Amino acid sequence: MSTKKTLLSIENLDASIGDKNIIKNLNLTIHYGETHAIMGPNGSGKSTLAKALAGHPDCEITKGSIKYKDIDLLTLPVEERSNEGLFLGFQYPIEIPGLSNSVFLKAAINAKNKHQELKDVSATDFIKELKENADMMGINQSFLSRGVNEGYSGGEKKRNEILQMLMLKPTLSVLDETDSGLDIDSMKIVADGVNSTRNKENSTIVITHYERLLNYLEPDYVHVINDGIIIKTGDSSLANELEEKGYEWLTKKK
């Protein structure tokens, strides 16, 4: 009998974007301390799953349930999901001109602390940790006073997403194609950042097309999603098999 504590439980989930039903009766369980990879062809439902978890307004849940920390996630507004430790790394990080990285992160941390009835982070501790994590992610210190993602390259935006993850210390991180558009050096930096956060008190969902990032992250489980349902689950070797064979050998069996 498993003694692992469940962090996320998705049961019989249907989700739509507009009038199109994309997620269809999907089931997934994630325990504390695990890293799960979600792979699949374009349009299979990977990013829609991320939107469902994050509470994106374009995503309508039409059936099923999502329990997170034993809370009915679907009843929580977006900001409460964040304050409860849910983090979404966007496929296309947006720019927020006029709001500096440092101000944005400090406000987000203090909002989370207030929700959890903790004290505001001290300015000294915040600046020290921010600089250390920025160095880890190869982000120039001058970027911290610039608008969030303003004028950043694609790779810099992705590294900045992981900087936010490092600072916010989420319980569940959902990284939606964080590896897209990254060169080898940036991918290694991103993977090192993600790996540095892993412990028994949190979990990560990595949504990707490719096994390159997974070679660095070594997920506990790899799930293949097609036409809105998970059609196969395996260990990290499944990602290598998909790189060699593609998806057709699985989707034909559906």
Image: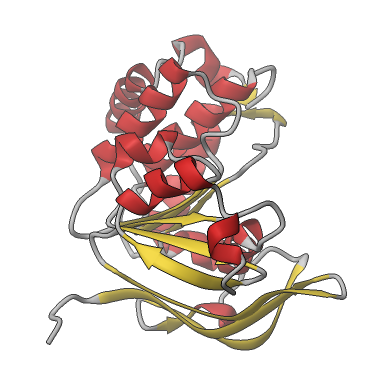
Q: Residue at x 64, y 18 (%)?
A: 153
Quadrant housing the N terminus: bottom left
Q: How many marks?
A: 0
Question: Which one is in front, 91 or 104?
Answer: 91
Residue 1 to residue 187: above or below: below
Residue 41 to residue 116: above or below: above
Residue 116 to residue 103: above or below: below
Question: Which one is in front, 123 or 24?
Answer: 24
Residue 217, quarter of picture: top left
Question: Which one is in front, 98 or 182?
Answer: 182
Q: Residue at x 56, y 43 (%)?
A: 177
Q: Is residue 43 left or right of residue 19?
A: left
Question: Which one is in front, 165 or 1?
Answer: 1
Q: Residue at x 50, y 62 (%)?
A: 224
Q: Is residue 236 left or right of residue 206?
A: left
Residue 221, quarter of picture: bottom left
What colouring style does the render use? secondary structure
Residue 149, quarter of picture: top right
Q: Residue at x 51, y 66 (%)?
A: 81
Quadrant housing the C terminus: bottom right
Q: Position of residue 44 (x, y in %)?
A: 66, 61
Q: Is residue 219 visible?
A: yes
Q: Position of residue 100 (x, y in %)?
A: 59, 27
Q: Position of residue 106 (x, y in %)?
A: 45, 38
Q: Is residue 106 visible?
A: no
Residue 248 to residue 5: above or below: above
Q: Position of residue 11 (x, y in %)?
A: 49, 85
